[in-house]
Amino acid sequence: MVAGARTKPAPLFWVVAVLFQFMSLAAVAQNTTHLNITAIGAAGGRSTIECWQITRPFDTSTDPGTAGTKAQQLGDTTNLTLTILPPKFDGGLHNAPAVQYVAFTSGLAVVTLPDSDEKATIRGGKYGLIIAADIAAVSKKGHITRYPSGSTTTALQIRMKDNIPPAHSILHKGACRQDELVGL
Ligand SMILES: *[C@@H]1O[C@H](CO)[C@@H](O)[C@H](O)[C@H]1NC(C)=O
Ligand SMILES: *[C@@H]1O[C@H](CO)[C@@H](O)[C@H](O)[C@H]1NC(C)=O
Ligand SMILES: *[C@@H]1O[C@H](CO)[C@@H](O)[C@H](O)[C@H]1NC(C)=O
């Protein structure tokens, strides 16, 4: 193009092409869902309750039986334990024995901290997945877990390989809110 020449209006083709580009970007962005998960973390030697967002977004499954549906990779795990907690059980003050997911499948768990008012209430079921990462190496006292339900609370404890939590960002202090969980 000669310097100083007037810019011609963009041909319709390019306008349409750019528009499509934006539309597909918007569609991809809409499909990118991140899992938010309540975490018992640690900072400055004390346990914390935080809402984590898992860095890796949901993938679309290609596995037989679930192909085309949303699937979240949750990292490398080792050692799975099914835990059965009797009604009104008091787990007391303790550290997470390992960095682990706890998937509450029934009942109710209430997590509190020894030196703060922070509290997380987790109902067994669809939104029952948390991560407990306040191992003794990072938290002096740990956290308190009680199971106030009148019926049994069941949970799967899923330990992370080498105590490495999944890549995440911290959305905020305190447990994830319901509106941060329901976008599944
Ligand atoms: C978004 O997800 C919907 C349904 O899950 C799918 O039909 C569509 O092709 C996806 N769009 C993109 C851009 O991935
Ligand atoms: C697996 O988990 C159980 C229960 O938490 C624990 O007692 C055991 O030591 C763990 N085993 C390994 C290999 O980490
Ligand atoms: C996680 O939190 C983000 C930001 O608040 C939100 O946009 C997203 O929908 C949440 N994810 C789920 C699965 O609810």
Image: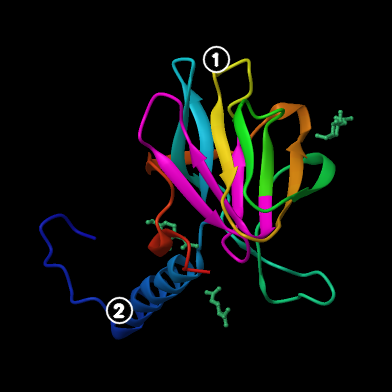
Quick check: is the Cβ at mark 1 less than 8 Å away from ligand 2?
no
Q: Which residue is mark 1?
A: 140
Is residue 80 part of the magenta span, yes or no?
Answer: no
Q: Residues within 10 Å of mark 1 (few under 14, many from 20)?
A: some
Q: Main secondary structure of the magenta part?
A: strand
Whether residue 24 can be seen here: yes
Residue 133, quarter of picture: top right
Give the side of residue 130 with respect to residue 73, left or right: left
Magenta stretch in the rendered image: 103-132
Amino acid type at image mark 2? Val
Q: Which residue is mark 2?
A: 15
Residue at 63%, 60% in the rendered image: 107
Instruction: Name the N-terminal-most of marks 2 and 1.
Output: 2
Q: Is residue 134 above or below residue 126?
A: above
Give the side of residue 9 with respect to residue 141, left or right: left
Locate the N terminus by quadrant.
bottom left
